[in-house]
Image: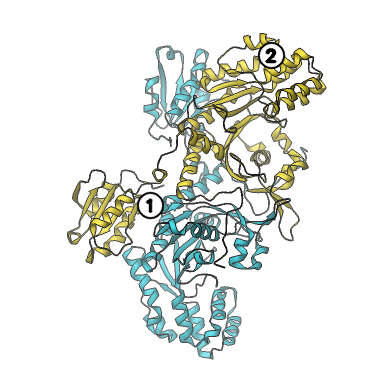
Chain colours: A cyan, B yellow
Amino acid sequence: MAEHSFQAPKGTRDFYPTDLALRRRIESAWRSASVDFGFDEIEGPTFEHLSLYTAKSGEGIVSELFSFRRAGGENDYALRPEFTPTLARMAAAKAGGLPTPVKWFAIPTMYRAERPQRGRLREFGQWNIDLLGLEGAAVDVEVIGVAILALERLGLTARDVQVRVSHRAVIARVLAALGVPEGKSADAMSLLDRRDKLDAAEFHKRASALGLASDAVQRFDLIARATQPLAQTFDQLASATGVELGAFSALEELRASAESAGILEWCTVDVGIVRGLAYYTGTVFEIHEISGAERAIAGGGRYDGLIELFGGPRMPACGFGMGDVVLSNVLADRGLLPKDAQDLLPRPDAFIVSAGGDADRFVAALARNLRSAGLHVRTSYKATRNVGKLLSDANKARARYAIIIGAEIADGRIALKDLASGEQRWISIDEAATVCGHTPHAS
Amino acid sequence: MAEHSFQAPKGTRDFYPTDLALRRRIESAWRSASVDFGFDEIEGPTFEHLSLYTAKSGEGIVSELFSFRRAGGENDYALRPEFTPTLARMAAAKAGGLPTPVKWFAIPTMYRAERPQRGRLREFGQWNIDLLGLEGAAVDVEVIGVAILALERLGLTARDVQVRVSHRAVIARVLAALGVPEGKSADAMSLLDRRDKLDAAEFHKRASALGLASDAVQRFDLIARATQPLAQTFDQLASATGVELGAFSALEELRASAESAGILEWCTVDVGIVRGLAYYTGTVFEIHEISGAERAIAGGGRYDGLIELFGGPRMPACGFGMGDVVLSNVLADRGLLPKDAQDLLPRPDAFIVSAGGDADRFVAALARNLRSAGLHVRTSYKATRNVGKLLSDANKARARYAIIIGAEIADGRIALKDLASGEQRWISIDEAATVCGHTPHAS
């Protein structure tokens, strides 16, 4: 038995303390940004009935899922590959009793039975923001704004990441203007969606197959790859592609809202952003590291038909998902992780040492008093009474103060050493909680 | 499709905002108590290789697990039914490079394919504390102390819950003193473990089958059900059961440590606490609501051979698990949940309303500034310009302040209304973050 070496399943992670501290820092930015925008946190089961996923995505999704059946049970389950079906189910179940708008966020763990690669694991954390019940560019911008606030709190700026936005109405009008027949518009969207996976020749071949004339293929290619700051007007793009300016009106509304909300510099128009053919109905966006070196940090948009699909009322909706794996890579790429990962761990307020003898028996009681007052307190487990060695352990633990209990405890006095300044003084044992207590952790 | 009604899988929970706020309050008490005792948080995969569980518990455990295999994959996986195998695997993998002691906590989600009943679900949260590398009663008491600190922070006292402690060495010496032959001691422990599930006649029948004489059966029954404050000496119990006083020495050491640490009043001796036959080697304990009405809130003890079982070095260890389901029931039983669940949700610092006209366009920008300063800010989504109605929405949202933007914004002035006192005054827009910012949420 002791010979057997056990390992974590492929595509999953073991989080040792500094690994988890980084993940918690990310989650804390997600959570605080959500709360500050007035979103309430929800959570659902880690696994759902398999039919919840096949209802939305068809049987084809089963091969991408970890699905299972309890021994002797009748139902097939699947580990959740995304949160939206759970959210839609929960919203549909309470549709009559929910306020308008519904503003929910969640930080669930997700599972995908895919081959692991950079930025893509089989188990990962994903922040979900959903705003249900309201339409309009200002709402879409609010949703984008939550993502930006979280990224700012992690140290990222508009020079590190950009929100690439497009809009289904703009895409539809552009395709019509280029002469894509109505029956081929789904094929054209699908081609747009795959533009980065095809070389130029293949793209042109497939664009021609849509029935486009040779010059329209050129203009389709141009607009499929067109990016520009959202701050910029569309005159130039319209004249270069021969698409009327009015086709871009949905993005112009988005620009006006983004400007009011002060996030215009974070946004780039990328007309070819489609986010798949499923369920998006208006604004679509992805957040990318600016060099494009990593996968998308987040993706989302407006999906006004989704709640209805899961048995609820028709309800406009806008939201996004942001995973922890790509984001961690981007933070590392941008030098935004602490050089010493230990700095992510909480620092003890006090480290109590005993000078030996009768003092030993006061350590546990003092530790309990200070912890009850909300302080992070450590003590030594060593038998040594060499106070110098014990103080060195206190320093290694990165404690703010060392408390030394010696014979003076008989008079209720203890020595307090500020480990940053090295200054040491006598205090009354009753003062200890107040003096060390500048950063209480009590809940 | 819209006719289909989707539901959460049996034994799992949908957490709407107030449900999740309660769970987060519990997790926050767990996390802060862990940190204040100097434990570092870890996490592992939600599913593990099935063999990790069968190695420890045998093939019999499979029927209690949600196990599965990826389509086309070779490995069987299982959703984790407990965290200890993951922890042991992680400790074994880094055994050479870990500090002594290792103090880890985790708040993982667990899964058991059992019939759901009160206090027992198929998916639940469980706090795990593990202290590796040290022996001794003081360490066991430290581990118990973490649990007590978290329960205190949730409002529980020693009059609500008690830690019921026993010790494997005491049980072994008691069984020997009663005359249980060595070859039958596992059977005797197993009988002790099931004492609450058997009626008196059945218990006596099985005790006789151990080879105990009739008076020894009586004494076995007495000690199996004996409970007394840990503060009390064992003289009485020893003389009533004919067991020598020295048999209780391990519990006497625990008493001395619990007294030093100031948690003696929280502890009850319950000799018959066994916690199953698997892996415990010394102190064992369970935490129960004092009336015994609910299942155990937590269970744990010392398991010095476990890390070795998973391929690591021999390493003493002590820890416990505490689930969220029973604990939530106990908090409800004891009246420790807020009467209005809304009170668990975060309160907005400010609710911004526009008096209409040109003021509208300042709302989003001010909201962004205040949120960037770490404030929780909400705005109205209503088209109405009836300020009275909007202020009533601010009150409903439980905001601390309402900010009213009117024509005076032209001079950089906004109206600030303290919603508790009703007092309203003019402030400069630049002061808003400072004035409303007494409770920043910035990470």
Question: Can residue A318 be seen in this snapshot?
Answer: yes
Residue A243, located in which quarter of the rendered image? Answer: bottom left
Across and down, in percent, residue B280 comes to: 69, 29
Quarter of the rendering occupied by the C terminus of chain A: top left
The residue positioned 45% from the left and 35% from the top of the image is: B336
Question: Residue B151: horizontal and vertical position, in percent?
Answer: 50, 31
Q: Amino acid at mark 1?
A: Asp
Amino acid on which disc 2 is placed: Ala
The answer to whether any part of residue A154 appears in the image is: no
Residue at (37% x, 27% y) in the render: A435
Sort mark 2 into few (<14), some (14-19) or many (20+) by Cα contacts within 10 Å.
many
User: Subunit of mark 2?
Assistant: B
Give percent across and percent down for residue A367: 48, 25
Q: Which residue is mark 1?
A: A36
B380 left or right, relative to A354: left
Q: Nearer the viewer, residue B419 or B104?
A: B419
Give the answer, above or below, for where B372 lies relative to B275: below
Instruction: Give left or right: position of A72 versus A252.
Output: right
Q: CA distance from mark 2 to mark 1?
A: 59 Å
In this view of the protein, which residue sits in the foreground, B318 or B155?
Answer: B155
In the drawing, what numbered circle is on residue B247?
Answer: 2
Q: Say which residue appears at 51% left-offset and 31% top-offset.
A: B37
| Label 1 neighbour load within 10 Å: few <14, some 14-19, many 20+ | many
Q: Chain of mark 1?
A: A
**Element at label 2:** helix
